[in-house]
Image (cartoon, rainbow, N blue to C red):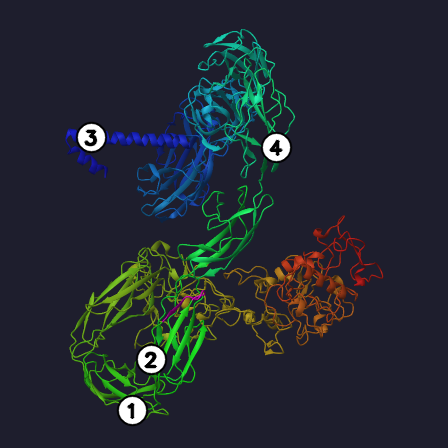
Amino acid sequence: MGKVIVKNIKGMGWGARACLVALFTILATVLCLQMREAKDAQAAVAVQTQWAILGTGTTSTLPTMTLPKGAGNNRLLVVKVVAEYGSAITTFTPTVSYGGQALTKIVATDTSSRMKVWFGYLNEAKIAAATGTTPSITVTWNSTPSAGVGLSAAFYSNVNQATPTTGSRAVASDTSATTPTSGTINVTAGGTAIYGSNLNGALAASLPTGYTEHFDTPNGSLYQDAVGSKPITASGTENPRPTWTSARYGFAVIGLNPATTTLGNGTAGSSANVAPGAAAQKLDGFSLVTGSAATTDSVTGLTVTTTNGSAIASLSIQNEAGTTTYFTAVNNPGSDTWNFSGGTPIPVTNTSANYKIVATYKSRAAGAPAGLTATTARVTTITSGNVFAGSDTADTTLTLSNVHAPSTWGSNSVGNASVTLNWSYGTAGQSVIIVRYTASSDTTKPVDGTTYATGNPLGSGTVRYVGNLSTFTDSVGLVNGTAYYYKIFEYDSYVNYYNASDVWTGPLTPISPDAIAPTVNAGFAAKTPGNTLAVPITAGSFAGTDNVGGSGISGYLITTSATQPAAGDAGWTTSAPATFTVAAAGSYTLYPWVKDGGGNVSTVYATPVTVVVDMTAPTVGSFTVNTQTNSRNIPIGGITGTDVGTTVAAYLITSSSTQPAANAAGWSATAPATFLVAADGSYTLYPWVKDAAGNVSALSGLTRSVQVDTVAPTGLTAVFPADASTDQAMNTTLQSSAATDAGVGNVSYYFEINDGASYSTNSGWIASTSWAPAGLIAGTTYTWTVKARDGVGNQSSATPRTFTTAAACVRNDPTLTLLTPTGGVASTITVDGGTSVYNLKVVNNDYGGCGSTTFNLGVSDTDVGDVFDPPTLAVPSVTLAPGAQTTTTVTVKATVDHLGGAGKTRAFTAADASHAVVTTGDVQTTLNVVSCTKKTPLLIVGPDSGYLNRGGSMKYTVSIKNTDSGTGCTPVTYNLAIPSETNSTDFNASSFSAPSIVLNSGQIGSVTLTVSAKATAAKNVVNKTTVAASASLHGSPANVAVSSTVNNPMLHNSDSTSSAKWSANGGWGIPNARYGEFDCSTCHVQGGAATRNVNRIRETVAAPDASKGELPGAGQPINYRRTTGTSATQPVPGWDSGATPRASSQKICEVCHTYDATGANGTKAHPFATTATLGNHFGTDGRDCIDCHKHGKGFSVNGMGCTGCHGTETETITPDNRYVVAPPRNASGLTGTVSGAGNVSNDPKVGAHQTHLRGTIGFSNYSTVDYRCEACHGPIPTNFAHINSSSTPAFQGLATKNGAMSASYSGTKCNNTYCHNPAGTGGTLLAANVGTAVFPSWTSASYVAGGSKSVANCNVCHKVPGDTGFQPAGTHAGMNTNVTDCSGCHGHNGDATGTLAGRRHMDGVKWGVGNCDSCHGYGPGTWADKLERSGVAEGKGAHEKHIAYLVQRNNATLTATSDAFGSGTSWTAVCGVCHNGAAHDMGEAIPGTGRTISITPARNFGGTAVYNGIVGQSSQFKAKTCSNVDCHYKETPVWSSY
């Protein structure tokens, strides 16, 4: 694409080029900004010096190499070393130094291979210690390379110094491949993944997705060296696997771990209030620390996020001690995001350090917000080289207190040349200045921070008071009769004034002394209030008069007492009040009072006013309304109310829950009888009452829901019978549609019917839309109608209808007609296998009151020439009402591959009780196939699989049959194709002998498919070749696949035998190898050719390709007349003993073999010629060779099973026929005679082997390898190396109880084997239970009598229940092996049924099966029938009672057949309360396992729960009680008392 762009640029004009350059400049700028933003958001591992090859060599010598130290923090030098060896080595550990500092190995291809890759690193400390600014790099080898070396390196920064890598992997292969087997490593976000490869050829690689390749360079013709990397954005795994042309390779991947800097909480500050303009204070503490030892960082910037940052003037960052300021202080940015940079950066190490955010707050002049403003701050991001982690949470709240509520004036008064002022503070603890004016128009305000003194001017006024009192009398410079005004300003300790608005009082006019009291004018009046405590005073009725020359009326007051108030009492107002508020409802007498400026109060008013105050609303007592109505003027049943104040004065009903006003329209002095609504619908009615004082009742709980429905049901129609219909049944059901009602619903129906004479009846109102009238008679006309009504009685009616009942039933035979779709009686089929379809019409001729009839249909034909299939009916029967008819179909189909003929077809109905058989006339079908029916051909490929040698081929026959039919068919060309093959690596493309076949109808043709394997093919690989055929206008048959396998197991060659002989020639007997390719004809004659030898063996054999070498016995006569013999002179396959040395041989196998005593470059048995004297080949002289050397395995013995030598070969050895691998004969070659109950040989050694393997003496069959030959003869290899080894026993496995017992063999006896002496030292059973014959003789004729389970037979190996002296580990009271079913607990009865581990007679486990009730009871009601296993009878009942209680308490379910010991809900809820679940082994020790009492700690009460009894002994010896259990709390009862 780049070439295309350059080419197009060259063709542009200079103007276009300039535009393009500008466009690229803009794109580059945007990209850089985005990259910078990404870096600011998340730092990562960065490359400082990019990967480059520093030196290469053709053998092991590298040139002088230097590399300047990279820049940045937390640096890491990464070096890659590659080498190629002439032969594979395992460990690759070169020693690499940089400036005298040894690098640390990361990973290397330490598997056996020739191509080697090594990665190592040097951390920051060692980089700093490296000598010089451009140190040299040296390499020494642990194993000197011979075919080329190379070294490359890169510097990275921001790498975790303690754990610089997140993962690594190295793989290598000396087998050519196109990609590494694996490269999966763990990676961390912010890190970098790096891969390096070393290939044995100059091959370019295809990159893994997302990776950048830094170089891909060949070292001459020696190898290819490449490095690629990828920055990691998300933690997880990476698996970079480049691909290349198939080659040997070494490959390694590493992940660099980013250094991290973690932000955390520091030392919290102290939350407090601050004032506007307050000095700098700590607003948050935070900490910084790197993620690992030796890792550092430099934070060059950070971002602080505040809340309510508008209150803050500036922020700065300091260390916790406040001695160092970092970055440049930031003034308020206008938002809550504060970005710091510049100045001094913060150094970070792996020791956590604390820092703080310091805030300076705005002054009022600078715009400090009013009120209390809570501010917080926290660091949200940092800018540094390392990956950012962690977070800081705000830990301090500083509240800017800019609270300036205004002071308020109290009751001020005037005197002789004086004014007394009283005030209250808006904010407690503050001070005020008071300024006096002669007018109230001055707007001057004090200046924040300025202190004023008494007498100072402020605007047109004079400061008269400064302080923190609440009263002040101004008596300086006042003139009686002059009006004065005062303004008050409150300020705080920072001298910030409340100046949002002016707080005035005045006019205040000093007066001369006055001693005459004023009077209240006549006419004072008040009104009765309505639902309020505020009594209205009649406007203008309250006034007073002062004496002439007096000080004038200065105050008004109303009281409910005739006692004269004082002039200084509370409540006086400067103007007559409009209302007088009382404390509660009741009757009050109101007294008016006035006072003058001299403080003189009027005398008591002679005619006070009495009023009644009623504040209690009445309540609704009852409200009655029907829930449904068909009138929009809803009838009201009644409404009543009660009042405790005055009386109920009015009533109102609304449809809203909003309380109506007392003056709302609609109030009625009497209870309303109706309530009018505008439309149908559902309404909720609310009753209200009010009293004479105007109090309205609250929302009542007596609301009523009413549904108004004035519309009758709709949609009612008479449905059945249809109007004027006839022939209706006399049990006819009248049906209507379902009416719908938009209102109350609950629709019911009313049917009426009459005959116009004496018959009339109705259904009454019913819920159903159908009704069957009784008493109808045949042949009568009836009139009927239906009505519907809803739940409130609205009715609708349907139009009346009539119908006539049917006359009596009359039966007639049906009518049948069979015709073509066009009405004809004949048709012609012209297609092979085609069909003709005829219409069969059936008419039911019954009438009157008859019911429907089912007519069973049939069809038959007359087929001349047998060219048609039997005709078929579409349906077997039809059901028709009287007079009804229907049409179905009859299909006649031509038989496939018939071309001409004719036939007749007819249909019929079967007779029934009321109808006779009716048959149609014949229709004739003619078959005349004159065209060609094109059909899918048959595709056959044979055989379906085959074998071929490497470089050889396999031929298959591909056959196609033309299956077209018809006289008009022409030859068809069938094209062959191979849609797919599964193995192109080892196989060449397959081909046909011809690409197509031309066939006439019915012809079969064939071609040959050749599948060939490459000479480099691996053994046993498979190629599946798919064959397809197609032809124009024909369907394609299903594809056929054949499988071809390299290495025919039937052929004798180096591949099938894995022979290394003639490896320099590529092997032997395969294509292009020694002797040429062997096939069946190499040794066998084909067809009818003559040979005197058996198995059609040739009488002479020669190499297929003598140019590749000739066989030793080529042309030598072969004498093979019999498969077995008894002397060296008989014509059998081979004979060694007594027939060597020899110069030649006439044996078929020996013709080809050369001799080599080691077996490496020839055979050590049956050679063509040898100077050595060979012995009997494992006793096989005269035997048929294929007894061991199977033809199906290329005559190799590889993989041959035990039975190849030890008995009769079987395909699979099973537990049931395992004995067949026993040695078939003794040392004298005798097999003995099969006899006895066990059906084994009577020869002691042969029979004893068979007995051990067959399991005929009461032991079960074993499916574990431990009970085969290895148990007594030690590990036996899978090859034939043991053939001539010693047969002396070497015990292991089961024979030694997996090493627990020391077993030995002396002469013919086995000593201390677990199989025969389980009570021996290290065994399972008690020593006292030793058996009577625990040292058996190998040649004992009868070790166990008969083989059945009995005390006597079992006692041979160990004592059992019923045997004198038997000492059980647990209790076996009442048991006897002769009669007891051992399998309940032990999984066996000494028979052949134990097939599972742990459930066998003899596998080192004493028990292994049984349900929870096999030995004792389990659930309630199961204990009485079981033997008591504890030895004392008292245990059964107590167990049962405890279990019954625990089952009920814990809601547990016990299932004996599936519950498990020691686990599951049933265990923890019941048995596990008192027993532990370690092992169910009948043990009695305390503490211990099995039945041991071990009460669960959950039941502890006042201490650790303890069982005081002794297992197996009665409470008479020691009481069986429990202590410290919450089940009984106090002294527990004796166990036996239950």
Q: CA distance from mark 2 to mark 4?
A: 89 Å
Q: Is residue 1432 left or right of residue 970?
A: right
Q: Disc 1 residue type?
A: Val
Above or below for 1274 versus 126: below
Residue linked to disc 2: 802
Q: Main secondary structure of the magenta part?
A: loop
Judging from the image, what secondary structure is the residue with disc 3 in? Answer: helix
Q: Residue 1301: tell me if it is visible.
A: no
* Between discs 1 and 2, the one toward the N terminus: 2
Is 820 within the magenta?
A: no
Q: Is residue 1361 left or right of residue 353?
A: right
Above or below for 344 versus 530: above
Q: Quadrant of residue 234?
A: top left
Residue linked to disc 4: 589
Q: Magenta part of the protein: which range?
A: 790-797
Judging from the image, what secondary structure is the residue with disc 1 in? Answer: strand
Front of the two marks 1 and 4? 4
Neighbours of disc 4 within 10 Å: few (<14), some (14-19), many (20+): some
Is 793 within the magenta?
A: yes
Q: Disc 3 residue type?
A: Cys
Q: CA distance from mark 4 to mark 3?
A: 99 Å
Q: Residue 574: tell me if it is visible.
A: yes
Front of the two marks 1 and 3? 1
Residue linked to disc 3: 19
Q: CA distance from mark 3 to mark 2?
A: 95 Å
Judging from the image, what secondary structure is the residue with disc 2 in? Answer: strand
Q: How many marks?
A: 4
Judging from the image, what secondary structure is the residue with disc 4 in? Answer: strand
